[in-house]
Amino acid sequence: MTATDPKAVVTRYVEAVRDGDLPAVRDSFAPDATWTYPGDLPISGTHEGRTAILEDFLGAVGPLIRPGTTVIELTHAFADGDQVLAEWTSTATTVDGAAYANRCAGVFTVRDGRIAAVREYADTRHTADVLFPAHRG
């Protein structure tokens, strides 16, 4: 796999998130990348641009998690051209002591060695119950 191989790009991104390597996480995204998250949570919707992804989406979850408790594991990754289907598990403890454990999947589009788009699928009810309990509707 080369540095621009889509599967390697996605694997490198997930490993950077797992390792807390923020410069590598930032560098994983194209400046005009998009990330779409399902549901009606405060983090739901399409986040447009690297800064929005890092600050409004990923950054919105960080303060909810007790530092040092996040465990990310890439369990599968399948590539077809510039598309990568990745599945990962994410566990953590919230700042309130609740256990977060979710199985996620994402369809990543890679362009020129960077992530250009992501459509994520996850158990949004669990995310709401554990991360955003005040948002129950």
Image: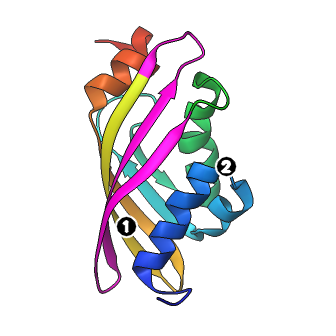
Which of marks 1 and 2 precedes in the sequence? 2
Q: Residue at x 46, y 69 (%)?
A: 10
Q: Residue at x 43, y 9 (%)?
A: 134
- Name the one closer to the observer, 123 or 91: 91
Position of 23 with respect to 89 (left or right) is right
Badge 2 crowding class, 10 Å Cα cut-off, few under 14, some 14 to 19, many 20 or more, is few
Q: Residue at x 37, y 67 (%)?
A: 108
Q: Which residue is mark 1?
A: 108
Badge 1 crowding class, 10 Å Cα cut-off, few under 14, some 14 to 19, many 20 or more, is many
Q: Which residue is mark 2?
A: 20
Identify the amino acid type marked 2: Gly
**Residue bounds of the magenta highlight:** 70-99
**Helix or strand or loop: what does disc 1 sit on?**
strand
Position of 85 with respect to 131 (left or right) is left
Q: Residue at x 48, y 50 (%)?
A: 47
Helix, strand or loop for the magenta stretch, by majority: strand
Q: Nearer the viewer, mark 2 or mark 1?
A: 2
Here the colouring is: rainbow
**Helix or strand or loop: what does disc 2 sit on?**
loop
Where does residue 8 sit, x and y in percent of width and height? 47, 77
> Within the image, what quadrant is residue 29 found in?
bottom right
Where does residue 92 sit, x and y in percent of width and height? 50, 29
**Relative to residue 125, is residue 19 depicted above or below?**
below
Mark yes or no: residue 49 visible.
no
